[in-house]
Image (tube, grey):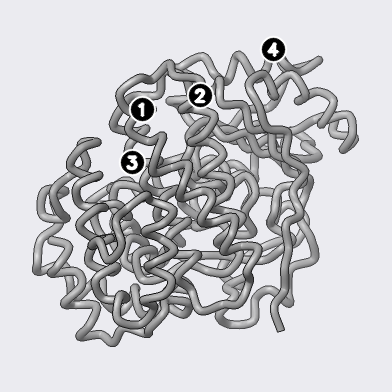
Amino acid sequence: MPTLSFLTTCHFDHGALGLLQKSLDRLGLKRPLIATDKGIAAAGILDTVKAAMTDGGSAAVFDETPGNPTEAAVMKALNLYQSEGCDGVIALGGGSAMDLGKTVALLAVSGGPLAQYDPLTGGNKLVKGIAPVIAIPTTSGTGSEVSLGMVIVLDDGRKMTFGNPKFIPTIAVCDPDLTLGLPPMLTAATGMDAITHCIEAVLTPTINPPADGVGLDGLWRGWRYLPRAVRHGDDKEARWQMMMASTEGAHAFTKGLGSVHAMSHAIGRREDLKLHHGTLNAVILPAVLRFNAPHCEEKYDRLRAAMGLEFHADVAEAIEKMNEYIGMPSGLKAMGVSEDMIDDFVPHALADLAHRTNPVQPTAEDYKALFMAAM
């Protein structure tokens, strides 16, 4: 039986940051922890957010979120949360900072260890709740501000996806102005992350027609406006549309994701590579689209319509052309991945939560071939 859930109160528009203090007051938060990263602080965005708060100058700040958030960083932020007597979290940044902030909020209420909440082993039954979270995205990619998931690299090296409706932030403040001037490569990578979310969500076999509609609308926006956002960092209309595409992508993937994410998580867990999640998704997506094509032809027609492609156009080829146009790497090899790493990736892809909702379940041999095709 389908379960249809769209739960976050989302303040969305240019200038939405002006509602931050009202959001804090609504939740009764007096001492939130701001979970962010060094780049957000250096860019002045952290100061902008503090200025939107009545008592922002004395806010507790954790700005050490790594590019792929780790359990160690979560625990360090949790220690600060507890020592400062915090009562909620402002998760400020891209997907990494938002995922870290949401995880801190989980452990603050439900306790550790983090690995016990693995949804594949029944961990959701152990979730007592989370502290209130206000999520403020500064990129347009993950949609973590409205999603029920977070992805953390555990101390044992696994990159684990945690998913539970209780993990959805209470309030999202989506202000496209915070993304103005985002560098072209980061705009491109996060934008392709949003596009991948929309595509994979539509292709999952889970039945949720409203989520399909949201995903197709997000794809329509992302596909048309990403090139503009990459070329013109100060284009307010393009930034608005890309942030909406990102938010819609996360609403859509309440259905689940697929093998693109299973593969990108398997690579992204590697500390020696330190690769960007959205860039990995962009590079891997064409190979998985070709693999999935025979199993969901009707849905590919809907993807073509949303992307404005001709009937029977090669969707994977269109993605490859978009990647080239916006400056994405030509393949995994260009990102420092070597063929001798594939045997390490495969078992992690097979164990990933996203693997379960791919239109067809790849075998270990299939994943080896997919990694090779993405090289």
For the image, the number of numbered tags is: 4
Tell which tag, 3 or 1, sits nearer the viewer.
Answer: 1
The residue beneath circle 4 is 51
Using residue 286 as the reference point, say whether residue 194 is left or right of it.
right
Contact? badges 3 and 4 (CB < 8 Å) = no
Badge 4 crowding class, 10 Å Cα cut-off, few under 14, some 14 to 19, many 20 or more, is: some
Residue type (three-letter) at the residue carrying disc 3 = Ala
The residue beneath circle 1 is 228
Judge whether 230 appears above or below 339 on screen: above
Q: Specify which label sits upstream in the sequence, 2 or 4.
A: 4
The residue under the point 63% across, 71% down is: 208
Q: Specify which label sits upstream in the sequence, 3 or 4.
A: 4
Q: Specify which label sits upstream in the sequence, 1 or 2.
A: 1
Position of the N terminus, as image quadrant, is bottom right
Badge 2 crowding class, 10 Å Cα cut-off, few under 14, some 14 to 19, many 20 or more, is: few
The residue beneath circle 2 is 237
Q: Which mark is residue 189?
A: 3
Give the distance between the C-alpha atoms of the residues marked 3 and 2, in whole angstroms. 19 Å
Residue type (three-letter) at the residue carrying disc 1 = Arg
Residue type (three-letter) at the residue carrying disc 4 = Ala
State the image coordinates of residue 331 (x, y, percent, origin top left): 15, 53
